[in-house]
Image (cartoon, rainbow, N blue to C red):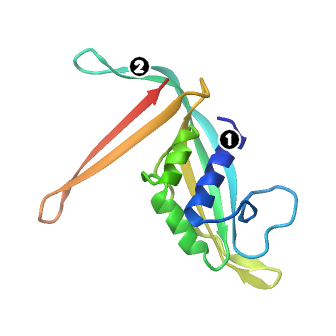
Amino acid sequence: MTEEQIIQAVRAYVKTELSLTDGQVIVANERGQRPAGAHVSVQVVSDVAVSRGGSVGSASGGSLYTAQECSQASALVICYGSSAATWAEALRTRWCTERPAADAVRTAGLAPLSPSATSDLSTSVDGAWERRRGLTLDGYHATTSPATAARVAASVTLTGTTSPASATFTISQELDP
């Protein structure tokens, strides 16, 4: 995926989840006037190779998966206006779900990873307090072929009725050609 494709996939997710228009979800640091009122900006802040290919074998000698070249991208999303905190929290909690908007991100070739916590970025602008809330949305994407989509799944099982409870984490990574 290119940086532009990552931005557009994240913009589409934000627009769908928050029911916003194109004009309300902008690309950060572009020339032009910011929208009046509440809006969201999106910017790719990193895109780093994390796998150079190969396969991971199982104890029985079979192959668990064959990895294509893969990168991890991070998009900084900043929500502006009185709904900033609500919007950021909604985006954070829905990023790794099976909701249609998150599925669209996967279809575009970006496999969502756990998002960051939201951060209060509110500041004074022209003498007035502007509410801002930011978060980073991370995802894997294949770099060897536009048709290759990365899929990451995680499940957590909590067991026990007394404190402390124990947790079993099952994390699988699969890269489909």
Marker disc for residue 95: none
Q: Circle 1 sits in a helix, a strand or a loop, which is it?
A: helix
In whole angstroms, how far apart are the C-alphas of marks 2 and 1?
A: 27 Å
Residue type marked 1: Gln
- Viewer-side residue, 48 vs 21: 21
Query: Are there few (<14), some (14-19), or many (20+) residues within 10 Å of tag 1?
Result: few
Give above or below for 53 relative to 74.
Answer: above
Question: Which residue bears the numbered disc 1?
Answer: 5
What's the residue at 57%, 69% (across, down)? 87
Query: Are there few (<14), some (14-19), or many (20+) residues within 10 Å of tag 2?
Result: few
Give above or below for 130 relative to 98.
Answer: below
The quarter of the image holding the N terminus is top right
**Position in image of residue 170 (x %, y %):** 29, 42
Q: Residue 86's image quarter?
A: bottom right
Observer-side mark, 2 or 1, equals: 1
**Position in image of residue 126 (x %, y %):** 83, 81
Question: Which residue bears the numbered disc 2?
Answer: 55
Q: Answer yes or no: do the residues labelled 2 and 1 have beta carbons within 8 Å? A: no
Residue type marked 2: Ser
**Position in image of residue 165 (x %, y %):** 18, 60
> Furthest residue to the top?
61
